[in-house]
Amino acid sequence: MTQTSGPSYQWVVPGSVDITPISWPVTTKDESWDAPQVSSKIVGALNESLSKQDHKGVASLFLENGYWRDHLGMTWDLRTMKGRDKIVSFLDNDHHLASIEIVEEYSSKNVASQVTAHRGDGSVHGIEIYIRTRTKYGSGPGHIRLLNYENEWKIWTLYTTMTEFEQQPEPRGHLRANGAQHGFRQDRENWLGRREEEFNFEKTDPDVLVIGGGQAGLSVHARLKMLNVPTLIIDENDNVGDNWRKRYHSLVLHDPVWYDHMPLINFPDFWPIFTPKDKLAKFLSSYAETLELNVWNSTSLKYSNWDEKKKQWVAVLERRKKDGTVEVRVLRPKFIIQATGHSGKKNYPNFKGMENFEGDVLCHSSEFTGAKKDGKGRKAVVIGACNSAMDISQSFCENGYDVTIVQRSSTTVMSSKAVLDYICAPLYMEGGPPVEVGDLLNWSKPTEMLKAAHADATKLQEALDKDTLAGLNKAGFKTDPGPAGAGLFMKYLQRGGGYYIDVGTSQLIIDGKIKVKHGVGISEILPRGVKLEDGTELEADEIVCATGYQNMKTTTEAIFGEEVASKVNLAWGYDEEGETKTMWRPSGHSGLWVHGGNLAICRYYSQLLAVQIKARLEGISQPP
């Protein structure tokens, strides 16, 4: 999945960009700053220039290298403009932004304009403004960061969005459905009858077909439902949540609950900080039921074809019902969303000699179900050294195995405590802001700023984890600080892997309870073990290849065929502006979108994807 030139911690998805982090400005804090007055003046000037179509006037309100990040507030794409010239050029093209307005409350939180620190260490001060973006078609939340430059206030970052349609607001709060049908009705149907008709698409076809019923598929269906877009999810698994339920026995999420909420329904206040896989599977199942999402499990796409003239798909589905019968349905959705995860096919190496292995287990980590309960005297080799590899190695060790990790390149390692304290906090933590506010502040940062912020956090993390990192390297397990020293989150966003959130395996390596072979590849699989490229032979009863996944495009080809896949761009990684490539944006093939990522990313971007699709259906947005 990655481009392998240069140090491994700088690798990126082929065709994507290794974004350079900003250099933080130097500022001072003045207690006399009047945040409300300054905010009103800046926003007033911005709106005046917009109304006059004075694009140079708009740009003059920004710092010379200021940023305008726009997620659908101006165009039907995800863009970031850096510098006055690019802002002018962007505005000179057609856009649908009408105005912005200052808000003092967002998601039940007081967000009045205030003097604040724009950098985590408090060294960069300015004013932040929460705004509402108004467009020709709707509105969305936004955010502004101001800096005082040579005694003049300028916009450092502006973030605009459109997440709601004026003519069709979401049916929430005072707009919720009545739920009852009062009065005389001769042919009255109850809720269950209506729900079954909707679920089975007895009279209509869905506008959107979603392939994949994990957090990606469920999140975008939830968003589309709020926009009244008929949607169907299909998944080959027998039950919602099986994509988690079927993973290795010891799996627990490494991200905390405050970061992982799904759209519309948060985890309860009593939910554990870290969610076990089977508990998450049950939650996702109940989530689909509660939101009345249409999920056909045990269903596969047998044939698909895009009709360019009619601008719709022909999709032939094979649905295995619980009574054992098989139903074949032909649907004609206008859009298909591939929601099979941000990665593609498993990256399962074809090592020499695999067919001669006489041990019990030789598999990819995605197929590993767990270590045997009494593994004393057994030997395991785990090929790979990131999250799955480390969790699986710990499971082997806890069950008495003699286990060796084969680490080919360095790994970004961060303790769970550091993730909570420096990556998630202060936006996602107990007592933190509502998740909507956390998302707004997080995604309002242009990627160059986000990367610099994570570099700051990584320095704090390295100080906290210094003994662990030193111990790992001494034991032969090599670590790195991530791209440009920006840690594991930026590594995830740039290449999709290469890191470990430490929940115990590091100490087992330091203590010698798990052995490590670093910097060597696999020469061949032996009948009872592994031979490394340096000639070392490792005995093994079980071998697990935690070797990651290929690009999402490989799954596109497996589902739709080579002709469709050839038009779809590689997914993940950044473009030149710092926006994620292909995901949640026009894919390159008409009528096909791709969606995936962790729970937090799916929560945020599912809304932007749903809005784009609704705009296409309403005819207010056209394909590029």
Image: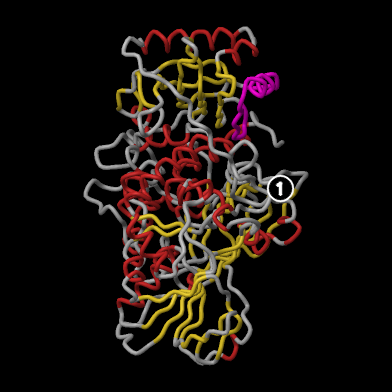
Looking at the rendered image, the quarter that the C terminus falls into is top right
Relative to 519, is 472 on the left or the right?
left
Q: Secondary structure at mark 1?
A: loop
Residue 333, placed above or below residue 508: above
On screen, residue 568 above or below 129: below
Classify residue 106 by image quadrant: top left
Name above or below for residue 348 compared with residue 486: below
Percent from the top left, x then y, of residue 205?
59, 49
How many marks can you see? Answer: 1
Colouring scheme applied when the structure was drawn: secondary structure
Question: Residue 255 at what x, y percent from top left?
Answer: 36, 52
Magenta-tinted stretch: 75-95
Within 10 Å of disc 1 (Cα), the crowding (few <14, some 14-19, many 20+) is some
Left or right of 498: which side holds 185? left
Q: Is residue 378 above or below residue 7?
A: below
Q: Nearer the viewer, residue 560 or 149?
A: 149
Task: Name which residue lies at 48% across and 63% down.
Answer: 297
- Asked if residue 355 can be seen in this view, the reply is yes
User: 586 left or right of 45?
Assistant: right
Residue at 46 percent of width and 80 percent of height = 381
Quarter containing the N terminus: bottom right
Q: Which residue is mark 1?
A: 589
Q: Is residue 221 visible?
A: no
Question: Which residue is nearer to you in this view: 500 or 106?
Answer: 500
How far from the left and from the top, in percent, is residue 258?
Answer: 32, 45
Amino acid, disc 1: His
Say if the magenta span includes residue 338: no
Q: Position of residue 410 (x, y in %)?
A: 50, 62
